[in-house]
Image: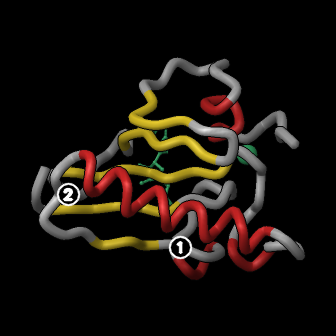
Amino acid sequence: MFVNDCIFCKIIEKQIPCEFLHEDELAVIFRDIHPKAKTHLLIVPKKHIHSIAQMEEGDEKIVGHLMRMAQKIGDKLGLSGYNLQINVGKDGGQEIFHLHVHLMSKSG
Ligand code: 5GP
Ligand code: ZN
């Protein structure tokens, strides 16, 4: 499930210290280290999926869960609105090849 040289797997496994705003059986949420908005969170599945382009049968449940977590953390933090972004592949601006959703907001 975990990939050795993957920084997000290491964060999820707690090999690298990182404060989680939320953790459940499928996903974690933590703040982006280089925020591009007042609130910039990363919603990350525990399963190592390289990107949307490498989704397997059944992963739609996980990706749907990430959207539900966006809604819940948005509510919890009282965000008035936010942008959700998924970069797919090098030419899509993806730098970390462990699927994640950026949640960015001017509020928070
Ligand atoms: P991507 O370009 O792959 O969609 O986004 C990767 C994001 O991960 C970037 O916004 C980058 O700032 C963030 N990031 C990279 N390494 C770390 C890290 O070690 N900790 C945290 N919290 N964020 C990271
Ligand atoms: Zn990973």
**Image position of 4 (left or right of 100):** right
Query: Picture coordinates of residue 49 (x, y %)?
Result: 77, 59
Tell which of 65 and 12 is nearer to you.
65
Say if 84 sits above or below 24 in the image: below
Query: Picture coordinates of residue 77 (x, y %)?
Result: 21, 46
Q: Residue at x 84, y 71 (%)?
A: 58
Query: Picture coordinates of residue 106 (x, y %)?
Result: 12, 62
Q: Residue at x 26, y 55 (%)?
A: 75
**Image position of 38 (left or right of 14):** left
Q: Residue at x 61, y 76 (%)?
A: 88
Tell which of 76 and 32 is nearer to you.
76
Q: Amino acid at mark 1?
A: Asn
Say if 98 sits above or below 92 in the image: above
Query: Picture coordinates of residue 29 (x, y %)?
Result: 47, 43
| Count of residue discs | 2
Q: SS at mark 2?
A: loop
**Image position of 81 (left or right of 51):** left
Q: Disc 2, ligand 1: is the CB inside 8 Å?
A: no
Q: Residue at x 64, y 60 (%)?
A: 99
Q: Disc 1, ligand 1: is the CB inside 8 Å?
A: yes
Chain-order first, disc 2 or disc 1? 2
Residue corresponding to mark 1: 87
Residue corresponding to mark 2: 37
